[in-house]
Image (cartoon, grey):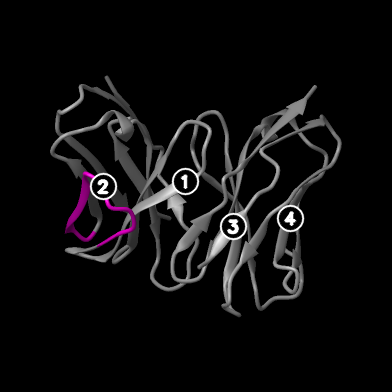
């Protein structure tokens, strides 16, 4: 079965600082990978998804970016964080084809 | 556009009773998948149950079952014999090419 590692679990960053959140997956190959953001008490907003190395689709234009340097590694980045970037970030993985998504434990990001 | 609507922001139920969470969706696709996810206070997202649109039989997983009404585009979740550990946010999700989530329903199970 697949395992999703997401770190750090919590992060406090000042406005204007850079960001790098990492997600790695074990137990599967060529997965579809996703980054979601969840504001407090709200639903999930899809930020990026990737169907393969170097292939990134952006759902919402913003100051965040994503990269997939390896098959089972997905990175969420920002050069300059905004207050509005605060939230709970979840990495998800699904197999090829129509498969449900399974989630990592998330990163709670607070911007000061 | 595919949308998922959960019209009940919050619900509560007494322990051991039954509760139904509603979900409606909008799509022009004929083949798709529907899911219910549970997010407890730990904030981990846990897949509860899935339903393939081409299957008429409603999915069940232990105390969890769905009422899938394809013509009405409705996908409700019934939780029987509610337990304190069922307290969580519940998200309905719809999958064609990518996953779309509803805004969630916060369920509280009271002792």
Q: Are marks 4 and 2 in contact (CB under 8 Å)?
A: no
Q: CA distance from mark 1 to mark 2?
A: 16 Å
Task: Check disc 3 and report its element: helix, strand or loop.
Answer: strand
Counting from the top left corner in percent of width and height, residue A27 is at 34, 56
Task: State the residue position of label 1.
Answer: A44
Could you say where residue B14 lies in the image, as x and y percent from the top left? 83, 29
* Mark 3 surroundings: few (<14), some (14-19) or many (≥20) residues within 10 A: many
Range covered by the magenta-colored residues: A57-71
Give the SS element for disc 1.
strand
Q: Chain of mark 2?
A: A
Nearer mark to the viewer, of 1 and 2:
2
Per the model, the C-alpha gap separating discs 1 and 4 is 19 Å
Q: Which residue is mark 2?
A: A62
In 3D space, how far apart are the residues under numbered discs 3 and 4 (Cα atoms)?
Answer: 12 Å
* In the image, farthest residue toward the top: A112
Check chain identity for marks 1 and 2: say if they share one.
yes
């Amino acid at each position: 079965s697949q395992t999703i590692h997401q770190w750090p679990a919590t992060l406090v960053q000042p406005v204007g600082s850079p960001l790098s959140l990492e997600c790695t997956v074990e137990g599967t190959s060529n997965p579809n990978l996703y980054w979601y953001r969840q504001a407090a008490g709200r639903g999930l907003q899809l930020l990026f998804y990737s169907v393969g190395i170097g292939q990134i689709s952006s759902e919402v234009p913003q100051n965040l970016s994503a990269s997939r340097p390896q098959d089972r590694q997905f990175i969420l980045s920002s050069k300059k964080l905004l207050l509005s970037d605060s939230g709970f970030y979840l990495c998800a993985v699904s197999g090829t084809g129509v498969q449900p998504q399974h989630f990592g434990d998330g990163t709670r990001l607070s911007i000061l | 556009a595919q949308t998922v609507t959960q019209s009940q922001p919050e619900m509560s139920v007494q322990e051991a009773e039954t509760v139904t969470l509603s979900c409606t969706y909008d799509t022009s696709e004929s083949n798709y998948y529907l899911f219910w996810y549970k997010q407890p206070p730990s904030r981990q997202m846990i897949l509860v149950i899935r339903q393939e649109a081409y299957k008429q039989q409603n999915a069940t997983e232990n105390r969890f079952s769905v009422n899938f009404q394809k013509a009405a585009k409705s996908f409700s979740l019934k939780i029987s014999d509610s337990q304190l550990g069922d307290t969580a946010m519940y998200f309905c999700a719809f999958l064609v090419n990518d996953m779309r989530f509803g805004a969630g329903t916060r369920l509280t199970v009271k002792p």
